[in-house]
Amino acid sequence: MRAIPTFLLLAGVVASAYRSVRSVQRVRRVVALTPGTRTSGTGVPVVAVVPARDEEAVLDECVRGLRAQTHEDLRIVVVDDASTDATGDIARRHAAQDPRVSVVRTSGPPRGWKGKVHALYAGLGSVGPIPGSAWLLFVDADVVLGPQALDRLLDTAVGAGADLVSSPAGPPEKRSAVWPLLVPAGLQMIGENADPDGRGRKAFAIGHCILVRRSAYDRCGGWSALRNLRNEDIALATAVRDHGGVTRLVDGVDHVTTSGMDPWSQGWTSFRKSFVAGTRGSVPVLVGGGLGQIVLSLAAPAAAVFGRRGLRLAGLAGWAARWSHTCSPPG
């Protein structure tokens, strides 16, 4: 009887290691960000939209980062999405200081729309005519872009022949223990159901930083076609791909940071939205998948700590395989 839990633990270690190897293979298909020496994006108009609801704690730094971009032809729209705090005041202060910044106020989504999708749609709608050659940048209010982030994303997209690129974000400067505990495992779980280079059933994109050609956005119907979806990032990337576009996940973590995954409550809220959308709201599937993720995540460290010699070595190897994908360079 004692052999049964040992076998199950070993099976968990093997399964966890196998998943991690698959994750490494996917991570190596992530496109490296260009070094910033190209000029592919010179003269290309970009419209950036920031959806913000009660984001007074982070919005100022986000807009400052956008205003500091080295890209010249940039318009910034902040959507004050029915905020009840000082979000609107902060946005209007930036608009008064910089003519490139505008603010649109909404009263929340109408029936049939999800909140963030409607805010993004309203932000674009407030701009007026947008050139067909333009690119659209969607940035969450808790994201800060380094000065060269936009130019590098544009150069990378053009170099890769992509119509949509998206980048994960690095942790804030004063990150907590939540980041290494929650983010790698969460991204691994999401990444197993969506592909960084657009192959497979779904294309991978991360909603806090998406850059897409306006023409590709229009071709797939834009946010209006996705109005009732929660996982708008993956849905947009998949729609662009399904309408003949090319999508790529790029490694811009040195130029994109977010506080939206830290502390625990914010990280959990973000991943919960993706998991609920991915399981279509099915409680049994969500609970079963969550418990399975916990078991597989704990199998290797449990074997390494509590197992006998052979099992302990297997646990250590599985644990190393699991974490290696977090530091594997893109290929």
Image: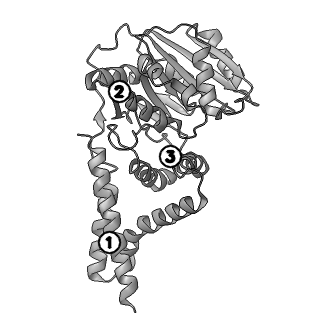
For the residue marked with disc 2, what is the amino acid? Gly
- For label 2, count other residues whose C-alpha is less than 10 Å away and answer few (under 14), some (14-19) or many (20+): few
Label 3, label 1: how far apart the Cα atoms are: 28 Å
31 over 178 or under it: above or below: above
Residue hosting label 3: 175
13 over 271 or under it: above or below: below
Label 3, label 2: how far apart the Cα atoms are: 39 Å
Residue hosting label 1: 315
Residue hosting label 2: 244
- Which of 251 and 120 lies nearest the eye of the viewer? 120
Where disc 1 sits, the SS reads helix
Mark in front: 2 vs 1:
2
Considering only order in the chain, which callout, 1 or 3, is on the residue closer to the N terminus? 3
Tell whether label 1 touches label 3 (CB within 8 Å): no
Where disc 2 sits, the SS reads loop
236 vs 328, left or right, is: right
Considering only order in the chain, which callout, 2 or 3, is on the residue closer to the N terminus? 3
Q: Return the x and y of residue 19 as percentages of the image width and height.
A: 33, 59
Q: Return the x and y of residue 326 as percentages of the image width and height.
A: 34, 50
For the residue marked with disc 1, what is the amino acid? Gly
Q: What is the quadrant of the C terminus in the image?
A: top left
Mark in front: 3 vs 2:
2
- For label 3, count other residues whose C-alpha is less than 10 Å away and answer few (under 14), some (14-19) or many (20+): some
- For label 1, count other residues whose C-alpha is less than 10 Å away and answer few (under 14), some (14-19) or many (20+): many
Q: Return the x and y of residue 266 as percentages of the image width and height.
A: 59, 46
244 over 317 or under it: above or below: above
Tell whether label 2 touches label 3 (CB within 8 Å): no
Mark in front: 3 vs 1:
1
